[in-house]
Image: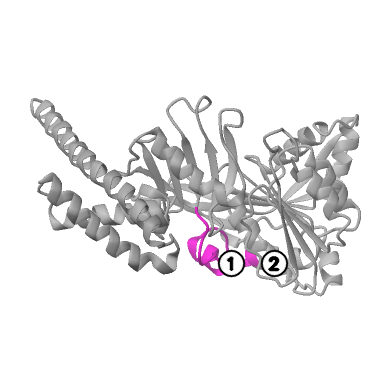
Amino acid sequence: MKEIPGREQEEALNRELKMKKKRGQDEVVIEVLNKVIEEMALSGISAEEGRKKDVAVLVGNQVNEVVNLSKKHIAYGERQAVVQAVLDEIFGFGPITPLLEDDTVSEVMVNGPDKVYVERKGKLTRTEVTFRDDQHCMHIIDKIIAPIGRRVDESSPMVDARLPDGSRVNIIIPPLALKGPTITIRKFAADPFTLEDLVSFGTLTMDMARFLKASVKGRINIIVSGGTGSGKTTFLNIMSSFIPEDERIVTIEDAAELQLQQDHVITLETRPANVEGKGKVAIRDLVVNSLRMRPDRIVVGEVRSAEALDMLQAMNTGHDGSLTTVHANTPRDSLSRLETMVMMSGMELPSRAIREQIASAVQLIVQVSRFSDGSRKVLKITEVLGMEGDTITLQDIFEFRQDGFDEMGRVRGKHVATGIVPGYIDKLKTHGEILPPSLFKLPPQVADLGFRR
């Protein structure tokens, strides 16, 4: 017990030394950055990727000059770190640039200037990356939003944006964010996951994948339901890849991140209001407009509000095979969320009428979840059967049966069929999708345990 205070003091001292060293580097970075920008303006060198080598030489020379004039002792490795920091400020997004370039990082979270977290394999860890101050954070935010015509200030302190590679960005600044500008970046995968990848990860089985592929091709209306960070958009992206090439697809999102591979795709993105508070285009507006664009399929990145009514009406009026996602923890919750969102549309509809609309529009719900070990799995694939009295009836086709954790803390369990054949199997046949009855059979070892519906 006596060793703990000493160890804590040592750790605190190390942190203080690191911070002091970084402050010294930051001073050099700021001085070099100002001189380089001035010299670039005088010499006509632009901040384009093709001129990076020229700028790197310029930065290197300026670093040596500043260090020599200050008579500070900075090792070669530290000088190179300063050069890279300056290049990241000019060509990238400042101190978070290396995190954005790291393929193992799936999400970057800036909680103010001195706390930067990343997600790797579903786990959150704090990094040693920091910004100089709030102003430095705001400078990087401006670099993110300026190219796409978005704005953020005290009168409009929240914004959704995207990076040039398609990564999704959410920004919220003071006075709403009390501890400084907050940036959340969901990285865009340069090499998108495939269905085979998800099967190898244990997200679902090949039988489940085969069933979902047939359901998409058979023009079944599907909702992907799950919590934040559960992998809804990734799953939606993979499922949309099963849509035939000869169909016209319209995608609608707040920040475009779906990566459909088909040729005939129209990508629509919402727009916030301008400085005068005018010009806002919401998802609902785009859903309504998409119906005039002769779509075969409508794919909405996520329904959050009144657009749910328009989406359901589209699914009920010939645009079958449409796909969307919704925030919910269970298939039943996702239907309740849809009902609440329809009520937000301002239409004075009785609850039963709304439920009938939902039951006739939605045919399948895929529930995804992120577990404590960071893994993401399909929890249930649930069919919507229709109405019984005032209640929408559901039946599970596949589900994940958890069996605790292994010695490494990883989730243990298996995906199983429930033994129930979906009611729309005949509709799949009319689209040429033939599934063997064995696909839906309850495994013998599960049946022996008395697992029945």
Q: Position of residue 16 (x, y in %)?
A: 18, 33
Q: Position of residue 276 (x, y in %)?
A: 71, 33
Residue 207 belongs to the span the image colors magenta: yes
Q: Residue at x 85, y 66 (%)?
A: 426
Pick whichever, 192 or 250, lies toward us: 250
Q: Is residue 299 above or below residue 54?
A: above
Residues rendered magenta in the picture: 187-209
Q: Measuring from the top left, give residue 39's x and y in whole percent.
A: 34, 55
Determine whether the residue tagged by mark 2 lies in a helix, strand or loop. Answer: helix
Question: In this orientation, which residue lies closer to the viewer: 174 or 191?
Answer: 174
- The answer to whether 327 is drawn above or below residue 42 in the figure is above
Q: Earlier in the sequence, mark 1 or mark 2?
A: 1
> Can see residue 380?
yes
Q: Is residue 279 above or below residue 178?
A: below
Residue position marked by numbered label 2 in the rendering: 213
Residue 113: image quadrant is: top left
Instruction: Identify which amino acid the numbered label 2 is placed on.
Output: Lys
Q: Is residue 72 left or right of residue 207?
A: left
Residue at (83, 41) in percent of width and height: 309
- Front residue of 414 and 270: 270
**How far, Cα to Cα, is label 1 from label 2?**
10 Å
**Does 120 lie within the magenta span?**
no
Which label belongs to residue 405? none
Residue 439, x across and y down, in percent: 68, 67
Residue position for label 1: 195
Q: CB under 8 Å between callouts 1 and 2?
A: yes
Name the residue: 23% across, 38% down. 23
Q: Amino acid at mark 1?
A: Leu
